[in-house]
Image: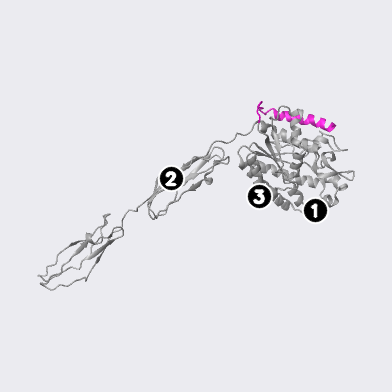
């Protein structure tokens, strides 16, 4: 209790400093769920210990938390869960459904990467390059999760709740389950306190950079929080080590003293056969209370009182090219497309769905329809384009074909009967009847005579005279 009183004073100062920029809105009553806990056993234990409701009820927060604010985490917390687990499409679908079922959730609290780290960290054999590559893989999965969350609704904010120092020091000295604790510790190659804390802090620093690269995503710095609250037995008292730096500068980072684990009093206690053992990884109920307190003072009080507006404005589709458009029969139709812009999502042209087809083999009028919706589900007014497939102009002349012999021979004084010619056109077909023959043959006079055959099709294309 003494530690609680000392901490209440120190944290209240931080709380008041942050609250000075919060605009409270009296009388607001949001629907039940505002915060969704997502992640591993740290989120599970925060949920099961009612860490946030206990903070809401604390006198220091009187009037600061909007009425009816509740926390959800029964579906999206997973003991032993990893960032790799939650980045899987099947788990993301569970998360998406939970957000869809609870449209008032506008804060997603993420506690992940711890299990990924502990199961891959090798204190002695990892080179700096290997450690960086492992962190790359961990953070890539975390990125997938964060980007998925913010894509669900434009009013959702994400907070990655950082870890505090763990305590393998006391737990290894007297393990409650040697197969688990010692096996875990040995798999990490028996890191020193400083090695383990330094590696965790390194991943935390990179997590800040990741959060800064994604809109509406933030990091809550907790390294050293338990040192600040409880001190460390026989070494330093509460409040004598620096409080973890908070945004925007996060100075100091880390807080507390990186040379020491979190104190045993801050850790979860496991009782077996009447003996109490220190849990190496998990905080006590009070430890998670202060973790929730830090989240509230860093971000959540302000966010709960100043929610981002819901997006109710649909995007706008703009056609490119002509409308109506014209294409010749038999030609290839290339659609000019359209663009789409949204007040929140920006350029969403890539999300446009076009329906309808144009069959240039058949003359007629065809309709293409363009639809798009923004991330909030607002559908644009559909836009249509009429495409007229028209007959191609006839530019091909007919072809005249002579019948009979050429040259032909007639006897003097005989009657000459001309064999004539035929004419075919690509559009008009047989136009033999339109052939005009010029020239005469006078069989009374010996000589050479020329007959010329001409024809034009309905489009005015003249055949090569024959």
Residue depth check, mark 1 versus mark 3: number of the one nearer the observer: 3
From the viewer's perspective, is 108 left or right of 54?
left
Rounded to the nearest whole Å, what is the CA distance between mark 1 and mark 3?
30 Å
| Residue denoted by label 1 | 187
Q: Position of residue 138 (x, y in %)?
A: 70, 49
Q: Quadrant of the C terminus?
A: bottom left
Which residue lies under the disc numbered 2? 385
User: Which structural element holds mark 2?
Assistant: strand
| Nearest to N terminus: mark 3 or mark 2 | 3
Classed neighbour count for the residue bearing mark 3: other residues with Cα under 10 Å, few (<14), some (14–19), many (≥20): few
Point out residue 137 in the picture as x, y percentages from the top left corner.
Answer: 69, 50
How many C-alpha atoms fall within 10 Å of the one at disc 1: few (<14), some, or many (≥20)? Answer: some
- Write the start and end of the magenta stretch as one range: 1-29
Residue at the extreme right: 274
Gap between marks 2 and 1 measured at Cα = 64 Å
Q: Is residue 4 above or below residue 366?
A: above
Determine crowd level at label 2: few under 14, some 14-19, many 20+ residues with C-alpha closer than 10 A.
many
Among the two numbered marks 1 and 3 on one chain, the one whose residue lies closer to the N terminus: 3
The percent position of residue 184, horizontal first and vertical second, equals 81, 51
Which residue was labeled with disc 3? 90
Q: Report if residue 163 is visible in the image.
A: no
Q: Quadrant of residue 54?
A: top right
Q: Are marks 2 and 1 in contact (CB under 8 Å)?
A: no
The answer to which quarter of the image holds residue 300 is top right
Is residue 369 among the parts visible in the rendering? yes
């Amino acid at each position: 209790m003494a530690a609680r009183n000392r901490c209440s004073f120190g944290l209240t100062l931080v709380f008041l400093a942050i609250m000075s920029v919060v605009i409270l809105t009296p009388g607001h009553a949001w629907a039940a769920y505002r915060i969704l806990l997502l992640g591993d056993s740290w989120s599970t234990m925060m949920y099961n210990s009612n860490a946030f409701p206990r903070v809401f009820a604390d006198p220091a927060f009187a009037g600061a938390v909007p009425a009816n604010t509740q926390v959800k985490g029964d579906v999206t917390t997973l003991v032993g869960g990893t960032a790799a687990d939650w980045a899987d499409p099947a788990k993301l679908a569970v998360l998406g459904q939970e957000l869809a079922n609870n449209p008032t959730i506008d804060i997603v609290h993420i506690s992940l990467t711890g299990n990924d780290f502990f199961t891959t960290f090798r204190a002695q054999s990892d080179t700096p390059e290997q450690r960086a590559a492992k962190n790359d893989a961990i953070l890539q999965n975390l990125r997938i999760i964060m980007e998925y969350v913010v894509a669900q609704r434009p009013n959702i904010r994400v907070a990655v709740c950082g870890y505090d120092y763990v305590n393998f020091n006391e737990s290894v000295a007297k393990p409650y389950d040697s197969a688990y604790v010692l096996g875990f510790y040995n798999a990490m190659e028996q890191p020193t306190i400083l090695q383990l804390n330094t590696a965790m802090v390194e991943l935390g620093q990179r997590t800040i950079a990741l959060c800064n690269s994604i809109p509406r995503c933030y990091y809550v710095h907790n390294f050293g929080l338990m040192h600040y609250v409880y001190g460390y037995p026989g070494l330093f008292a509460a409040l004598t080590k620096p409080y973890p730096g908070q945004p925007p500068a996060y100075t100091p980072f880390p807080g507390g003293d990186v040379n020491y684990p979190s104190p045993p009093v801050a850790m979860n206690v496991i009782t077996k056969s009447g003996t109490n053992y220190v849990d190496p990884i998990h905080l006590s109920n009070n430890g998670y209370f202060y973790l929730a307190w830090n989240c509230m003072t860093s971000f959540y009080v302000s966010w709960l009182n100043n929610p981002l507006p819901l997006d109710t404005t649909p995007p706008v589709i703009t056609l490119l090219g002509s409308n109506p458009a014209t294409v010749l029969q038999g030609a290839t139709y290339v659609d000019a497309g359209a663009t789409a812009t949204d007040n929140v999502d920006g350029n969403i042209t890539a999300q446009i769905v076009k329906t309808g087809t144009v069959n240039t083999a058949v003359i007629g009028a065809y309709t293409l329809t363009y639809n798009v919706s923004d991330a909030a589900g607002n559908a644009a007014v559909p836009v249509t384009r009429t495409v007229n497939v028209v007959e191609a102009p006839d530019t091909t002349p007919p072809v005249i074909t002579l019948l009979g012999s050429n040259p032909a021979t007639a006897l003097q004084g005989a009657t000459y009967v001309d064999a004539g010619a035929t004419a075919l056109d690509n559009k008009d077909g047989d136009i033999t009847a339109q052939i005009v023959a010029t020239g005469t043959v006078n069989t009374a006079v010996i000589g050479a005579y020329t007959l010329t055959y001409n024809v034009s099709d309905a489009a005015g294309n003249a055949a090569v005279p024959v």
